[in-house]
Image (cartoon, rainbow, N blue to C red):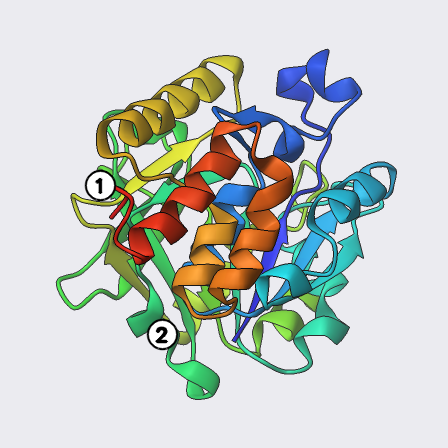
Amino acid sequence: MRGIILAGGTGTRLWPVTRSVSKQLMPVFDKPMIYYPLSVLIDNGIREIMIITTPREHDQFRGLLGDGSQWGIRIEYGLQERPEGIAQAFLIAERFLDGRPVVLILGDNLFHGIDFRDRTGGPEMTGGHIFAYPVVDPSAYGVVEFDESGHVLSIVEKPRNPLSRYAVPGLYLYDADVVKIAQSLTPSARGELEITAVNEEYRRRGTLTVSVLGRGAVWLDTGTFSDLVHAAEYVRVIEQRQGLKVGCVDESAWRAGLITDDQLRSLADPLTRSGYGEYLHGLLEWRTGTGRIA
């Protein structure tokens, strides 16, 4: 399975800040926003990832992340010339996917404590799989209704009268058919290839399933300035309480065995003047029994 992080778009809800910088490069507490979805993919066994950006911001993302080899993964880049919907990501990434199943994660969604490895099905995955997350005001999101066996009965975008209290977060798993499905879509009234239309096609086929993110899982959107503050505060509280970082790509690669202690040390050394670099060194000290980080 390969991964896509959709980090394009114009970020108009965060203007004027995002007129000069991508939203996904903005800090969420102590890390660039893009680190959070990237670490989720690494934690869940994804090693080949395409990051889709706008042409204007491509060089900035490449300068930050490179080709991923420093973390033992492969990163490629795709360009979203115009923001024409989430499902456009599958058209941009067609060659990269090369007929393989895919997990798509939105670059401005922050997940913590989520494990979807048992949902991928590996190369033999069939159908599509989405997640459900309970929210207080489901009418602000895409809302999924499902039966006890996990089959989706309906998905409605921002309904006035929601049929459930479960929102659909920006994390989607699909088999190789998703590219052909995206190619068959007609743009919506707002001129976009809607991810809801992709999910509806899988639902029509009877192959769309859903699972509820457990109480230990966290999903935060960062679409507004208030959302950004809430996300940063969540990360700050968790990190300062537990002493463990959220969304630390270097740590994810190290814990997954993709890089060695020496490689982690090489990544940490240039960052010694920041708390991030100190944290990475602390991981190695703990490994040798001299530190406190678990």
- The percent position of residue 104, horizontal first and vertical second, equals 53, 58
The correct choice, above or below, for 106 with respect to 153 in the image is: above
Q: The residue under label 2 is which amino acid type?
A: Gly
Q: Amino acid at mark 1?
A: Ser
Instruction: Identify the image quadrant of residue 49.
Output: bottom right
Q: Please provide percent x and percent y for residue 122.
A: 42, 82
Residue 128, x across and y down, in percent: 43, 69
**Residue at 80% of width from left, 21% of height from top?**
20
Does dot 1 land on a helix, a strand or a loop?
Answer: loop
**Residue at the spot of label 2:** 206
Locate residue 177: give its quadrant: bottom right
Distance (Cα) linking label 1 and label 2: 20 Å
Image disc number at residue 164:
1
Crowding near pointer 1: few (<14 within 10 Å), some, many (20+)? some
- Residue at the image position 37 percent from the left and 29 percent from the top: 235
66 horizontally vs 140: left or right: right
Residue 95 placement, left or right of 34 = right
Q: Looking at the rendered structure, which numbered label has been put on residue 15?
A: none
Q: Residues within 10 Å of mark 2 (few under 14, many from 20)?
A: some
Instruction: Say whether disc 1 or disc 2 marks the residue closer to the N-terminus.
Output: 1
Task: Single out the residue that lies furthest toward the bottom.
Answer: 124
Answer yes or no: is residue 1 visible.
yes
Residue 143 left/right relative to 262: left
For image coordinates 35% across by 39% down, the residue present is: 219
Q: Is residue 223 above or below residue 213?
A: above
Where, by quadrant of the figure, is residue 149 drawn?
bottom left
